[in-house]
Amino acid sequence: SPFAPAPAKRLPLRSPPVYLSPELGFFEMAGPMKRRKQPAEASSSDKKQKKEQQAQEAAVPADEEWEDDDLEEDAEEEDIVDGDQEEEEEEDEDAQAAPKQIWRPGVDQLEEGEQLEEEPGTYDMLHRAQVEWPCLSFDVLRDDLGAQRTDYPMTAYVVAGTQAKEVADNRLYMMKWSKLYKTLKDGKEDSDDEDEESSEEEEDEHEAQLEYKGAAHPGGVNRVRSMPQAAHIVASWSDSGKVHMWNLQAHRKALDTPGQRVSTVVKPIHTCESHKEEGFALDFSPHETGKFLSGSNDGAIYLWEPVAGGWNVGAEQPFSAHTSSVEDVQWRRTGADSKHIFASCSSDGSVRIWDVREKNRNKSAVHIKDAHTSDVNVISWSPCVGELLVSGSDDGGFKIWDTRNTGVGAMANFQWHRKPITSVDWHPTDETVLAVASEDNSVSMWDMAVEDDRPEGHEEAHGESHFPAQLLFLHMGQQDIKELRFHPQLPSVCISTSGTGFNIFKTCNI
């Protein structure tokens, strides 16, 4: 089996809330969250008094000692803790003595006066970005900075499409995210202002940067994909019902030349108007440059063949066995005959595997009729084990299929999320790890090789049984998460987009 047992990599499954700032750019975040009482906020006079006291203490020479006995006694008498501080310390001691609890999103509720607080150490890296309008689809651009980059700071290039309030405000964004440092203060407690100045300088120096170049887009962007062999060639599904191809080479190059301007007015290099309805399904072939698929809400899938000066879109011979909207398509990533094989999923509840060499395009090579009990929203082929496919559904479940033998059912079936699955992606190099995004505002990381190795009679923390052994990590903080991708050149780095912006992160256990 490709899922050979491996040592468990379980860690506490808690993660941080992310709060938006109206500013444009990246902001450092760190840590999973723990529940605690909200402390009373210090007044400005208290803070000023504390700073003056620290300044006076700093003015005393290091070698000066209190030698007078009376002074020593006075100092001891004045060492008084006010009632509020004493109460806070008692609450902290009680919290430490209380049984450990694991936060269960969607199940546990915060009581009045409680908040979720970050706990450093769980993320190796976590940054977030925000542009003017939500980008509900994006793709990672391959670059020439190196295949498997592990050094910090990191750099990533991304293309994204907006869903603006006004049609005329929609854009395709070419973005460069740079100075992506490791999360600061991992595993360390905050100092009591003694190093406040140097800490602020260090944070400014390590502040991540966002650069972007925009191109006007006709209508909202349902989905966007970049050609693997030429990242500046971008395809977009417009909510107007058209599929566009773009050459954004000037925008991509300008990202590496600070201050260089490019026009926001760009004409598509090709437009397909053959689909009868709008759609979401798009994919470039990773094997043959320019070969492309588009699927729409009318159930049709078109194969685009590259020709001199553009594409020949097979609108007259669509793949048309689905009885409802095509939600996603993807070329198989590896294995024999991969360049001829793709998968599709539909709101008819099915998953189909197609061979483009077959002349009859009304019948798929493999048909998983009732893959899920409701709409199948997303699919993803494994880049390591060619025959494995993961599918995610409106019912909150995701399944893993061995496409060589679908008749026996799914290899794995996880009904853990409580709301629809919106995106799935396999880890580029670890054949058993995948990420799943859901409308419950979370991204879950899974390792199919992990077995529950807890000893018999193990005393569970409250809420621990809610989490399967295979669930490695739960990332939260974004609202209305739509897509996620593992970065193919930054090992274990994941990017997610939502109605409240982007997150780029690397967890400590993957």
Image: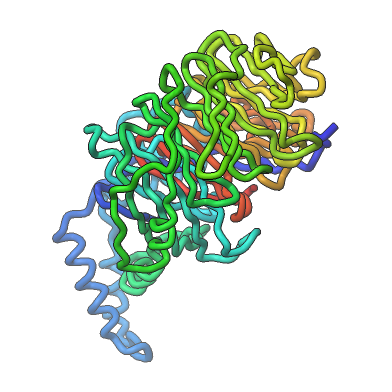
Q: Is residue 226 above or below residue 342?
A: below
Q: Is residue 210 above or below residue 269?
A: below
Quadrant hosting residue 473? top right
Residue at image coords 65%, 12%: 362
Is 281 or 120 nearer to us in this picture? 281
Question: Outermost residue, left direction?
Answer: 45
Give left or right: position of 480 versus 327: left
Is 418 or 78 nearer to us in this picture? 418
Give left or right: position of 191 versus 455: left
Give left or right: position of 78 versus 17: left
Is 317 or 391 nearer to us in this picture? 317
Number of marks: 0
Residue at image coords 67%, 45%: 428
Q: Is residue 56 above or below residue 492?
A: below
Colour convention of the picture? rainbow
Residue at image coords 24%, 47%: 22
Where does residue 234 sit, x and y in percent of width and height? 47, 44
Give left or right: position of 85 versus 256: left
Residue 101 seen in this snapshot: no
Question: Outermost residue, front direction?
Answer: 308
Is 255 or 12 nearer to us in this picture? 255
Quadrant hosting residue 43? bottom left
Where does residue 122 sit, x and y in percent of width and height? 54, 49
Where does residue 82 sit, x and y in percent of width and height? 26, 54
Residue at image coords 85%, 31%: 1
Where does residue 195 sit, x and y in percent of width and height? 36, 72
